[in-house]
Image (cartoon, grey):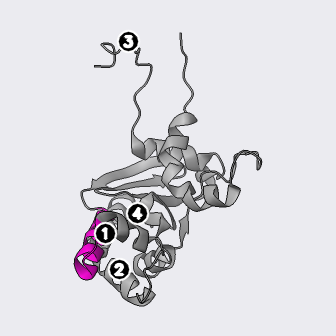
Amino acid sequence: MLTAAGLKPVIIDLDVFALVNAISISRNLEEMGSVAVIDLGGSFTHLNILMDGVTSYTRDIPIGQDAGTNSLMSKYDMDYRESESMKVGLLPEGTESQEVVDAIIESYEPILEELQKSFEFFSTTSNSQVEKAFICGGGALIPGVDGFLTDRLGVPVEIFNPLEALKFGSRKFDLNSLAQMAPIATVAIGLATRKFNYL
């Protein structure tokens, strides 16, 4: 298909490895022990666990943060776009923020169960415990999600900003807006950092 479009494929990469490339720009993963990278996507949650910077376990969980969107659509009788806005804290007048948080948290239970199973499997097969987790993707934009996952997974969880090691001109970009939306750019930045020989 690519060649038919006049394109010459040079390399094909996977999301889970692109995530690691993005994080490696600003963090020395080789010195961090066992680290989980969790991409909270719409229909999938991608998990990559590294030991000393090398992928040791990877899994695609067929559940994503769209479950939270669907929960809000049902609870508040609204459309997809309105529900997505609510998830990132843009609440209609008269809506209680705690009610929204509770609905989203409830929808995350199946994802949490699968992540916990994966952490346990990794621990059993590697004799190592996950010591820290980075989250990215659209689900990382939900207010308080890092604290919630820290409590439930039992490890420090950090929302990863793939732009923190990059330089941008403030005249051309709104740096605050970039920082707020940065987690959804992690895969793209990881792909952009990939080095290869064009010849």
CA gap, disc 2 to disc 3?
46 Å
Within 10 Å of disc 4 (Cα), the crowding (few <14, some 14-19, many 20+) is few
As shown in the figure, which amino acid type bears the numbered disc 2? Ile
Left or right, 48 with reference to 155: left
Q: Which residue is mark 3?
A: 6
Within 10 Å of disc 1 (Cα), the crowding (few <14, some 14-19, many 20+) is many
Q: Which residue is mark 4?
A: 127
Q: Which residue is mark 1?
A: 69
Residue displayed at 53% across by 9% down: 199
Q: Secondary structure at mark 4?
A: loop
- Residue 84 shown in magenta: no
As shown in the figure, which amino acid type bears the numbered disc 1? Thr
CA gap, disc 4 to disc 2?
30 Å
Upstream in the sequence, badge 1 or badge 4? Answer: 1
In the image, farthest residue toward the front? 93
Mark 1 and mark 3 residues within 8 Å of each other at the beta carbon: no
Upstream in the sequence, badge 2 or badge 3? Answer: 3
User: For the residues carrying marks 1 and 4, which lies nearer the camera in this image?
Assistant: 1
